[in-house]
Amino acid sequence: MISAQKIRILGYTFQSSMSKYLFVLSVVSVMALLAKNMVRTNIGRSWMAIRDMDMAAEVIGFRPMRTKLMAFAVSSFYCGVAGALFAYAYLGTVEPEGFNLDLSFRILFMVIIGGAGSILGSFLGAAFIVLLPIYLNVFINFLQTSTGIELPSGISSSAELMVFGSLIIFFLIVEPYGLARLWQIGKEKLRLWPFPH
Amino acid sequence: MKFIKMAFLAMVLATAAGFAVAQEQFIPLIDYRVGPYAAGGSGFFGGAIDYMTLVNMKGGINGVKLVWEECESEYNPTRGVECYERLKKAHGGASLVEPLSTGIAYALLDRVGQDKIPMTTLGYGRSDAADGRVFPYVYPLITSYWSQAAAMIKYLGEKAGGLDKLRGKKIVHLYHDSAFGKEPIPVLEAYAKKLGFELIKIPVAHPGLEQQAQWLQIRQAKPDYVILWGWGVMNATALKSAQRNGFPRDKILGVWWAGSEEDVIPAGAAAKGYTTMTFNTPGNYPLLDEIRKKVYGAGKGNLEDKARIGSVYHMRGVTAAILWTEAIRRAQEKYGKGKVMTSEQVRWGFENLNVDDARLKALGAFGMMPPVKTSCLDHEGSGATKVQQWDGTKWKAITPNWLTGDKAMIRQMVEESADKYAAEKKIKLRDCSKDI
């Protein structure tokens, strides 16, 4: 069990939730910009080529071993930074229960639901997996207080899981390429609106 | 028209006045009712809510009503921290917090110190938090894992006919491979060195549905006793594997999280004779009858299945709620009866808790839990446990008195560990001689 040390950079200690949030936000913005640009460079395009068809990519001159290793290394780097921020800025401890198998699955689902191969998708997916259950929880509580009907505690907890699960299924059926694709389609449609071809 | 207006105004005023007069002490409940540990969460928090409902029905704490809000954490530290942040300022501020999860408790450790909200960790969490000099806001009330491990050795020694008889014996520590399972190892090792028994440590990976290899190892080692430090589905599997390998169940001693109805019923006949630690004496008490009659009689009970009233987890929830309300009552004695206490004042209440046998008798819970008396130095307050045995249908206490291990040794280890933590985190130790 490791208890996280205080975050101290250049003599400034990040103690309040707000300062920690701003710290995480700045790291995330820098890293996201970096990623966005990386996708457009030689490296990014080689990844896309390998993803679409590794044989063809090899024929046009990308070394698959090197490209795959590179993709693995870069994504591990991002995950490592995320894990460190999660432990130090949010949890405050490093212990197995905070980093269980469930968390790995969550990260995988974020990518799948958000849309593989897009930077926006990872943000949308993360918001979906992390924030939606919380909003559902708040919403169910709000419904209970505003209508005055009090559900047994077990039922409201289960209702949250059920709604969340069915939303995942709904989105995967409606748009298998993820929320990022849905966002893109929406944007294109709105641009043409109200006079589609 | 005027009359209607006047009546309306009067009504508004009356409700506003009603709100102003209503005094409420807020307790956030970071609970879990879904997921793999829902059986524990629903029983524990159901018990706590039942007791708080009863307190409110009897007029609150000197007229101050309790109010609570639940937040589903799914036993997930991420969700737990979010629940805590959401609820800490609700209803005028949280008086205390109890997550019933080691992971969430660790994540909240720093936050409760910053927000000055006391956190109780009944029978789990950091054992060294019993040292109030380093952890002013954490209360591992009644007993911690280290006290429990010491009590286990004491019980096994008594069973063998004296602690010195443990020399040369073999004890297996079969544990859930996590911070929870590893917590007692320093204490067990210290005892093994002191008393001269052989300690064999065998980890089981989460969730523990497959234990053939481990029990084969146990069979080869031929131990005299097995300590089962398990959690969730691992416990029933261990009991079934023990039966299959012909290891007598009455020589298995479980941790208290391996000792509820939900752990043994799935194991069926394999669980008969199995013993575990507990900090509640199983049985029926006037308080439980009162809950049955007043709370469930009025249809306000929290459990859906009435048969679970008085089950191990339910009783633990009632115990927790008794300690919370007694701490608030104690704080009121100092800071003003019938007033809403701030979290700082409730913290004082926890630090000066004195729930003795006479008080427990008055509550109708005499014998249900050991008497608890805390101080600035000792946030645990008791350290006493009992051993219970499953007879196939219900738990039965098999030690008539409360057991405590070597308190001096545990205290020394607690202080050493807490000092190390304080040095690591650069915490200034509180001086208990003046800060009361």
Image: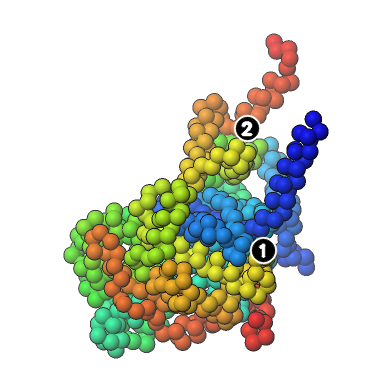
Q: Amino acid at mark 1?
A: Val
Q: Taking A68 as reference, is B316 left or right?
A: left
Q: How many C-alpha atoms fall within 10 Å of the one at disc 2: few (<14), some, or many (≥20)? A: many
Left or right: where does residue B313 sit relative to residue B12?
left
Residue shown at 55%/55% (left/top)?
B30
Classify mark 1: helix, strand or loop.
loop
* Residue A184 x, y percent position in the rendering: 66, 27
Tell me where residue B253 sits by quadrant: bottom left
Q: Is residue B321 above or below residue A157?
A: below
Name the spot of residue B113 as percent of width and height, x first: 65, 68
- Of residues B412 and A41, the one nearer the viewer is B412
- The residue at 34%/79% (across/down) is B401
Question: Secondary structure beneath disc 2?
Answer: helix
Color scheme of the displayed model? rainbow
Instruction: For mark 2, name the chain.
Output: A
Of circles 2 and 1, the one toward us is 1
Q: Amino acid at mark 2?
A: Ala
Q: Residue A88 location in percent, x, y?
A: 63, 61
Q: Is residue A192 at all visible to an observer of this figure?
A: yes
Q: Residue at x 59, y 69 (%)?
A: B329
Indicate the chain on which mark 1 is placed. Answer: B
Kindly identify which residue carries mark 2.
Answer: A180
